[in-house]
Amino acid sequence: MKAGIVVFPGTNRERDMAQALRLTSGVAPQMIWHRETSLPSLDLVVLPGGFSHGDYLRSGAMAAHSPIMAEVRRFAERGGYVLGVCNGFQILTEAHLLPGALLRNAGMRFLSQDCHLKVERDGLAFTRRWTSGAVFRAPMAHGDGNYTASEDTLDRLEGEGRVVFRYATADGAVLPQDRTCNPNGSARAIAGIASENGRVCGLMPHPENLVDPAIGGTDGAPLFTGLIEALAA
């Protein structure tokens, strides 16, 4: 399995992501600077969290125009797997690799806390280690995580089974209007979505920060172990 992690000015979660991939695959991913104009031979491209370009204009807006993103777009068009977490999810929407946008959190406050995610779509490479309805804990750390899209787009995502994760209570209840359950106010409590072919996935919380029992638990590990299994199949 060959993975590459794209690093932008202001990225700060690349090492967390590298450690998650290393622990679950045994292979160290390559770091790819955003000014590069080509990608090496890869199975997976990851856009990690942070504050690319200081979140100026809009979170992810400037990073979406970095030279490497043209190659990431071509990689995705060829059917490559792409994972975007937090700022990476924002970049995927700004680059139009995923629909919708991430707005300021409801309440206009930065959120740094644990949340619970409910798996809405199993069978994808990103969810093959879970069953639909499974709930897991994940840390969140963002100021612009309020997912929004037109009602038509939201209906299309629902109808096509492209809502992958939702914010939920620990027992799996989805309460979109309840800020203890859906703290950033995302439309329909959506925390993560996928592309039409299921090979591009973006989510706001950080499963890479829960892959090691020594630092709090392994709730996020199934995402990476399942993805690596899919790539090896």
Image (tube, rainbow, N blue to C red):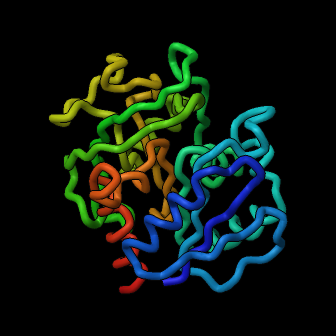
The residue positioned 61% from the left and 73% from the top of the image is 4
The residue positioned 60% from the left and 24% from the top of the image is 104
User: Relative to 82, is 39 above or below?
Assistant: below
The residue positioned 54% from the left and 82% from the top of the image is 2
User: Relative to 176, is 228 above or below?
Assistant: below
- The x, y position of residue 71, in whole percent, is 75, 70
Quadrant, the C terminus: bottom left
Residue 79 shows in the view: no
- The x, y position of residue 162, in whole percent, is 42, 50
- The x, y position of residue 89, in whole percent, is 57, 48
Residue 114 shows in the view: yes
In the picture as drawn, the residue positioned furthest to the front comes out as 214
In the picture as drawn, the residue positioned furthest to the top comes out as 107
User: Relative to 17, is 85 above or below?
Assistant: above
Residues 125 and 114: in front is: 114
The residue positioned 28% from the left and 23% from the top of the image is 175
Position of 9 compared to 198: left or right?
right
In the picture as drawn, the residue positioned furthest to the left comes out as 171
Q: How many marks?
A: 0
Residues 85 and 155: in front is: 85
- The x, y position of residue 116, in whole percent, is 29, 38
Residues 73 and 112: in front is: 112
